[in-house]
Amino acid sequence: MMLEIAIDGKKCTLCSLCIDACPVSCLAFDDAESIVLSDDLENCLVCRSCEDHCPARCLQVVFPEWQFRSSIRSEHVVTELPAVSDLFKQGHLSIAKDHTPH
Amino acid sequence: MSWKADQVVDTDVLIIGSGGAGLRAAIEARRYGVQVIVIDKGVIGMNSNTRYSGGGLKAALPGILETRYTTIYSTPEEHFQAALLHGEYLNDQELIETLTLEAPARVLELQEFGVTTFRAMYYHVQYPHGTGLVAPQMAYAKKLGCSLRPGIVPTQLIMEGDRVAGCLGFNTHTDRPVLMRAKAVILATGGAGEIYERNDTTATTTGDGYSLAFQAGLQLRDMEIVQFEPYVQAEPGLPMLDRHECEAEFFGILRNKDGEEFLKKYLPPRQEAVDSFEKQFGMPLTDIRERVARAMVSEVHAGRGDNGAVLFDLTHVPPEVWDADIASQYTKAVLMRNGFDPTKKPIHVLPGAICNLGGVVINAHCETAIAGLYAAGEVAGGVHGAARLGGDALVETIVYGARAGKHAALHAMQTEAPRAGETQLEDSKQEWQNILGRSAEGACAADTIKRGIKKLMWEKVGPLRDGAGLQWASDELARLAEVDAPRMFAPTLRRLREVYETRAMLLTARLVVASAMARTESRGAHYRLDYPYRDDRNWLRNIFVKGNDKDIGITTRPIRLLRHKPGPVSKFGLEVRA
């Protein structure tokens, strides 16, 4: 039931991409600037950005509650949209003419 | 810390920032056949506010873009009128008209890039919602042959005569100083939500673009206008995350510590029945955020808050609503993980900064006052005026992103390649080396200054402001800039990036405070306790800032009334003195 960011220190190349990818600065180098550690996990949004960006695939966000990916409602999915070119032809759309710059 | 060899790159169009506007600009510029490089101080695209946004787009596309979370207008004219009324006439009418006219076509055009999903759809498919907007545009830009380069921190724009010639910076991934020479440069760095302790933006939005533009001598406008998002969590131990973008939260009720539904006092409800926000107040929350945020903070100021926040009651939300969409399920799961059950007790919430509406002065071509320099997206100012409708920000990224890309490409095709920059690079390397070589003793950590700025900005320059608080904030920021900021140290390049971010935050904060002090009235998102009325007699004016680190010069100019004269009613319930 607990959130955990598991980092495999043996595979980690210290590329720092996971730190760059975190929107809330959960991850940081430690004082020796050597190991990537999860600092402020209470801020973690479980967006999995760090996991997606890890080139060494050594990082995993462990969050068992995240099991609802399958329950996507389908009725909200917009499937058929008119082609843009058709709408232009029918005069529904326009790209604004450039104004004279002031 | 040892530097590796310099990297000097020449290109036609250089785009700084890789959020929605940066990627859209890259695609458009590349369509004209010029060489395009996109740089970002972190990863490309995926750590931008666009990605972590609610993903809502607003455009006059009735029947196609339909969602109950935001009003969709049937014609661009209606959209234009609504935006102008909401922006309390501070908008540049030319910019907002262009936005509303072009929005429908640009939104539909997103399909070409593989964005198959409008709000209603990707809302249910993935989290964060904006991924469906960023990822396809990123892939498309790559396919077209744009070069996307992560890890490059821009520190300075370089000039050749009176035109821009590129930018300088360093790469935190490869430890190399970088000189990017370009015929045209587009600023798409986003805003500065990070200057506030409470914010709903990613940690990278530190106002870098405002700083780069200001240092280059450009004028910035309306910097006092900062939009606050109401429902940002303030529960100890829980992430400071905005969750209004989910089904369940539209049924939530705000209460003070006495359990009173206080919002009704500030915003007259249309009907009494407890139902979704939209039904109760006659408009979606995203179209009246400034007023709700102000009501919440007012309640806390009046001593009716609970632990310095207000309560957001979701206990009455039926279970089927919690299960209705992935965002609600996610919200519940993340709360439950911390042992917090939103179905049993109310959550503490308090507003947080979401969007800076002011910024670099541009025209409808996205041109700035410097030849070859363009700005698009949140870093540019004037589109939204004093407040912003929900969905307009993402539409701004695609409409003005495309415009900046086009005009930068056209400019690059008629321009000679610049040669400047080598000497500036040497100077900058010297400066970086000075900061890197500084010992920690007697120096000041960037982190400490950052925290100081964030705290004082939230306390004194938040949704409620007053003259004395602004003066105090101004003095304190000036002290930080003079005494602490020059002593920042950085043992590594990553910390050096933090030093530059802190400088940008400090400058942006000072611009916000200086402009807020000048505007002695309330308008849109800007509310002064000592001037709680809209003063149309004296303040139908835009505030411009220009200058340097030492001296911020303020000028005001009457708003350009192209089509519409201001109406007598304020959407924000303010008394209007005409």
Image: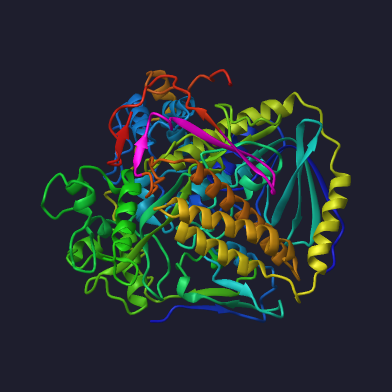
Residue A52 % position (x, y): 55, 64
Q: Is residue A71 visible?
A: no
> Left of B26 or right of it: where is B80?
left
Image quarter where the N terminus of chain B lies is bottom right
* Range covered by the magenta-colored residues: B532-555
> Left of A85 or right of it: where is A14?
right
Question: Is B460 or B348 nearer to us in this picture?
Answer: B460
Q: Is residue A13 visible?
A: yes
Q: Identify the image's colour scheme: rainbow, by chain, secondary structure or one colour.
A: rainbow
Question: Is B235 or A18 nearer to us in this picture?
Answer: B235
Q: Quadrant of residue A25?
A: bottom right
Query: What residue appears at the point 22 percent right and 47 percent down from the top-left corner?
Result: B267
Above or below for B304 versus B474: below
Q: Quadrant of residue A93?
A: top left
Query: What residue appears at the point 35 percent right and 30 percent down from the top-left corner?
Result: B79
Question: Is B276 or B554 nearer to us in this picture?
Answer: B554
Residue B239 % position (x, y): 43, 69
Query: What residue appears at the point 47 percent right and 71 percent down from the top-left corner?
Result: A43
> Left of B64 or right of it: where is A57?
right
Question: Is A89 or B161 nearer to us in this picture?
Answer: B161
